[in-house]
Image (cartoon, grey):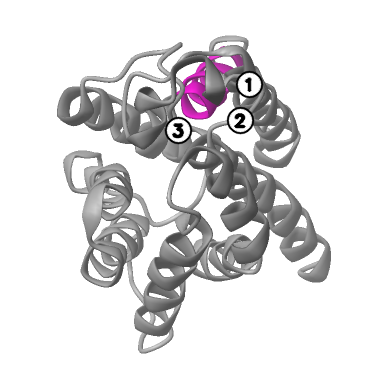
Amino acid sequence: MHQNLVLKSLETVANQEQYLNSLDSAVGDGDHGTTVARGMRSAIEELQKQDYETLNAINVVVGESMMDAMGGASGVLYCVFFRAARKCDTYTELTLDAFYNFVSRGLEELKRRSGAEAGDKTMLDALIPAVDTVRQHLEAGNTDLIAALQEVAQAARQGSDSTKEMTARFGRAKFLGERALNNVDPGSVSIAILFESFCENAKSLAEASK
């Protein structure tokens, strides 16, 4: 299921190109949606060439494809996040434990490479609460992937919404000062959409397989 889930989720995010551009026009160059969509469509094209035996390989292909197609800071960040799968245990089945390993290691690598933390008005403000929610489910002994993903998606969206009140420390938005207030960080929105896509597409694929 994982390869189809990733394909469908990347496509869902890519289809939000114009919406993400409109958000970015308030705090950046207005091209975040176009950049992300280009990277994700490149990853889709690469994934469609063959089936991969491990979830790790799928994630690495996505990261490398996005880096090649996007370039710039966004390309690096998405590449770092997905390619972190190289440092994870090897998985062939998508479980909540596997999902946590991938996203938590991705977050760890992003923090290390970017220097960003919660409250800096970046994609991490959506990613950190999402990863924390996965961890909480595992610690509580919950293993239902789809049920967990619903709360994970909500946490990512709430984290993204919270960036509206933050002062940016990175990117062009940091030069806007208070003018960036009342605007969400576009990178955090694309992460929120990605997790929402994982949730919705996981449910759809699970129902189709019954």
**Quadrant of image for the C terminus:** bottom right
Residue drawn at 28 percent across, 55 percent down: 75
Mark toward the start of the polypeptide (3 vs 1) = 3
Image vertical order of residue 63 relative to residue 40, above or below: above
How far is disc 3 from disc 1 in space, using C-alphas?
12 Å
Q: Which mark is residue 164?
A: 1
Q: Is residue 130 magenta?
A: yes
User: For mark 2, does the 10 Å Cα neighbourhood hold few (<14), some (14 to 19), or many (20 or more) residues?
Assistant: many
**Quarter-wise, where is residue 129 in the image?**
top right
The range drawn in magenta is 125-137
How far is disc 2 from disc 1 in space, using C-alphas?
4 Å
Cβ–Cβ below 8 Å for labels 2 and 1?
A: yes
User: For mark 1, does the 10 Å Cα neighbourhood hold few (<14), some (14 to 19), or many (20 or more) residues?
Assistant: some
Q: Nearer the viewer, residue 178 or 21?
A: 178
Rendering coords of residue 150 (x, y %):
75, 35
How far is disc 2 from disc 3 in space, using C-alphas?
10 Å
Image vertical order of residue 188 relative to residue 161, above or below: below
Q: Amino acid at mark 1?
A: Lys
Rendering coords of residue 167 (x, y %):
47, 14
Residue drawn at 63 percent across, 21 percent down: 164
Q: Nearer the viewer, residue 142 or 99?
A: 99
Mark toward the start of the polypeptide (2 vs 1) = 1
User: For mark 3, does the 10 Å Cα neighbourhood hold few (<14), some (14 to 19), or many (20 or more) residues?
Assistant: many
Q: Which SS type dominates the magenta stretch?
A: helix
Rendering coords of residue 33 (x, y %):
52, 59
Residue drawn at 77 percent across, 54 percent down: 203
Query: Quick one: SS at disc 2?
Result: loop
**Quarter-wise, where is residue 204 in the image?**
bottom right
Circle 2 is placed at which residue position? 184
Q: Nearer the viewer, residue 180 or 117?
A: 180
Q: Which mark is residue 123?
A: 3
